[in-house]
Structures are given as structure tokens and as C-alpha cells.
Amino acid sequence: MKRIALVVAAALLITGTAFAQDNAGSMAELLKQIEQGQARDSKEARDREARFAADRNAQQNMLNQARAERTRQERNSERL
């Protein structure tokens, strides 16, 4: 059973590699495509991190405003 799985995995690997090489035209083109994909993924990750930081800052601002409003309301309540 393990032998069959190994043969199938090897066949898929060979087929996938051959397909990628055919699409790339050459090893240099394949490398270029991989590097471009990594650059795109890296930019997307940076963009995602920037959005996360902006959202975190906005949430912190809302929390600070809510706390300030609560304090204001508590002081107003004590005054009455």
C-alpha cells in the first residue's frame, strides 16, 4: 500500500514539474515566475499588516473616546 502511494506521489511530482516547466518555457522563466509570486505575496502581506495596524489604532481611539465619555458621564452624575 505504501509502495503504491509512493509511486502515485512520484508520478504527480514528475507530472507537476513537467507541467510547470512547459508553462514556464525554461528554468529561468520558472524562477522569474516564482520570484514575482513571492514579491506579490510579500506586498500583499505588508498591505494586510498595514490594514491590521490601522484597524487596531482606530479601535484604540474608539476605546479611548468611550472611556473619556464614561468618565465625563460619571462626573456629571456625581454633580447632580
Image (cartoon, rainbow, N blue to C red):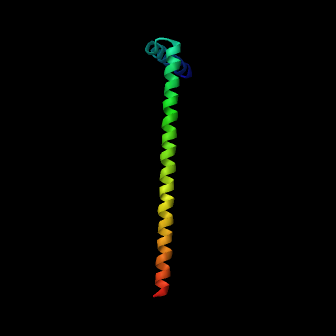
- Furthest residue in direction left, as rendered: 23
Q: Is residue 39 above or below residue 80?
A: above
Residue 32 screen position, x and y as percent: 51, 19
Q: Is residue 37 above or below residue 59?
A: above
Instruction: Please name whichever residue, 40 or 15, is drawn nearer the observer in this view of the structure.
Output: 40
Instruction: Please name whichever residue, 59 or 1, is drawn nearer the observer in this view of the structure.
Output: 59
Report the residue at 49% width, 15% height from top.
29
Report the residue at 53% width, 17% height from top.
10
Residue 64 screen position, x and y as percent: 51, 65
Report the residue at 51% width, 55% height from top.
57
Instruction: Please name whichever residue, 7 or 53, is drawn nearer the observer in this view of the structure.
Output: 53
Report the residue at 43% width, 15% height from top.
23
Quadrant into which the C terminus falls: bottom left
Residue 28 screen position, x and y as percent: 53, 14
Q: Is residue 69 above or below residue 28?
A: below
Residue 44 screen position, x and y as percent: 48, 37
- The number of discs equals 0
